Image (spheres, rainbow, N blue to C red):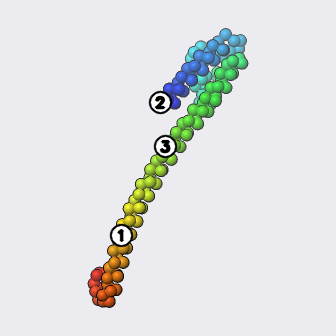
Amino acid sequence: MYVIGSTALILFVAALAVLDAERDSKGANIVDFGDALWWAMTTVTTVGYGDRFPVTGTGRFVAAGLMLSGIALLGVVTASLASWLIERVTEVEEEGQAATSRDLRALTKEVAALREMVAQLGDENSAGELNARLE
């Protein structure tokens, strides 16, 4: 929500700023708010069709800031997605480790019980009884 809200705000402010800088300039092709908003959308997404572009120094300064904002936005979205993926993978690994630990404890108990049985049978020295218990 923060990314969407801040992006909308940046687009609106950049469109107003470039419109203010370009509207009365000779050779300007950004002369109304619709043109300015279209220019801001294509610039922040780094598409830059080239149909609208600033011709004044101030307009180009606004464009540079908007381009950096677009790159930063892409970085935030990418980082958020990567963080979410890492979190999910970590959860799966932790669940797997917990299951492995449970299985290991169960096997350890079973081996201890078998050792006890073998020790008891070894004390009794009876091969027939060993075979009967193992079956």
Residue type (three-letter) at the residue carrying disc 3? Trp
Give the side of residue 35 with respect to residue 109, left or right: right
Residue 1, label in figure: 2
Q: Residue at x 54, y 27 (%)?
A: 7
Quarter of the image that includes the C terminus: bottom left
The CA span between labels 2 and 3 is 16 Å
Q: Residue at x 50, y 45 (%)?
A: 85
Q: Residue at x 69, y 21 (%)?
A: 60
- Which circle's residue, 1 or 3, is located before the other in the chain? 3
Q: Give the answer, above or below, for where 5 lies relative to 35.
A: below
Residue 84, label in figure: 3
Q: Nearer the viewer, residue 122 or 3?
A: 122
The secondary structure type at the circle numbered 2 is: loop
For discs 2 and 1, the disc positioned in front in the rendered view: 1
Q: Give the answer, above or below, for where 29 lies relative to 2.
A: above
Q: Residue at x 65, y 23 (%)?
A: 63
Which residue was labeled with disc 1?
109
Q: Residues within 10 Å of mark 2 (few under 14, many from 20)?
A: few
Give the side of residue 122 with respect to residue 40, left or right: left
Residue type (three-letter) at the residue carrying disc 1? Lys
